[in-house]
Amino acid sequence: MNKKYGVDMEELLAWMKANQDLSGWAQTAGALFALLIALLVPWMQHAAQNRRTRLMELESNIYLSQATMLLLRDAQILNERARQLADLPKHEINDPVLVTDLLERLRTLDAKDSSIPRQASQYIARAAVLRVNHYLDSGQAQSRELSPPVLKLLEDDCLHMENEFKKLNFLLQDFLYQQTKLQVAMWKRPLVWYGFKTKAGLKWLEASSAQQLQKLKEQQGIQRPRG
């Protein structure tokens, strides 16, 4: 007898002849398997394309959120500088270079961004920058100090920008959570949830966001004025 891998070939042939009706089931199973593959492959390709598109959208949202948050911080610095040096003459407080830089960055973000929450934050930052520039650069009473009503307006602007910063940071956390969830395997997603939705995870996220904002600032080559 010829045996291959310990199987008696004559017995195998005899079994196949005795069970010829199984060939129909085998053909049916093969056809169903081929149909499953034909349906599964395009679905997987479509899902992969959607995942790549979503990751690109999230990356754009993360960058624009960080850029807007950094802009709010720099506008706050301009605002706080004006209030801290309120006793000096206006022409000694004004920083036209920073004002020009902030307004240029606002124009750039406005052209790129279509997010309503971020646009609202950008409008508040623009109003705050223009208000500071108006009171410091106006031709009226350049040598006078900032009055208490003006200082109160600037303080309110600073509080509004701080609130907008917190709102954007909340949205940024969600973008980072969604991005990380898409970048890891399915079995790791509970770990991602733990990292982003617990106190320990939030502490890590705050530190990570601060590092990313600093990195973005270094990439843009922005120098903050010293108050």
Image (cartoon, grey):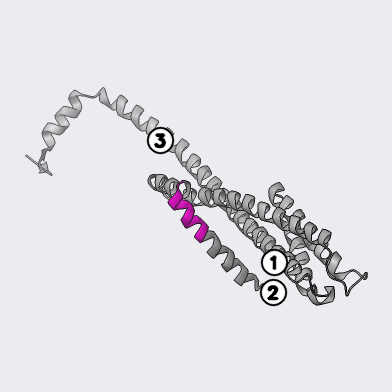
Q: Which residue is mark 2?
A: 225
Give SS at disc 1. helix
Determine crowd level at label 3: few under 14, some 14-19, many 20+ residues with C-alpha closer than 10 A: few
> Which image quadrant for residue 4?
top left
Q: Nearer the viewer, residue 157 or 141?
A: 141
Q: Residue at x 89, y 73 (%)?
A: 142
Specify which label sits upstream in the sequence, 1 or 3: 3
Q: Nearer the viewer, residue 212 or 31?
A: 212
User: Relative to 224, is 8 on the left or the right?
Assistant: left
Residue lying at 81% horizontally and 61% vertically, measured from the top left = 148
Secondary structure state at the residue bearing disc 2: loop
Q: Residue under circle 3?
A: 34
Compared to residue 215, the image places residue 55 above or below, namely: above
Whether residue 203 is in magenta: the answer is yes
How many badges with numbers are in the image? Answer: 3
Q: What is the quadrant of residue 27 in the picture?
A: top left
Query: Left or right: where does residue 23 sit relative to residue 79?
Result: left
Label 1 with label 3: CB-CB less than 8 Å? no
Question: Residue 215, how many percent across, how many down?
Answer: 57, 68
* Residue to which mark 1 is pinned: 77
Query: Label 2 is placed on what type of residue?
Result: Pro
Q: Quadrant of the N terminus?
A: top left
Is the residue marked by circle 1 packed among few (<14), some (14-19), or many (20+) residues within 10 Å? some
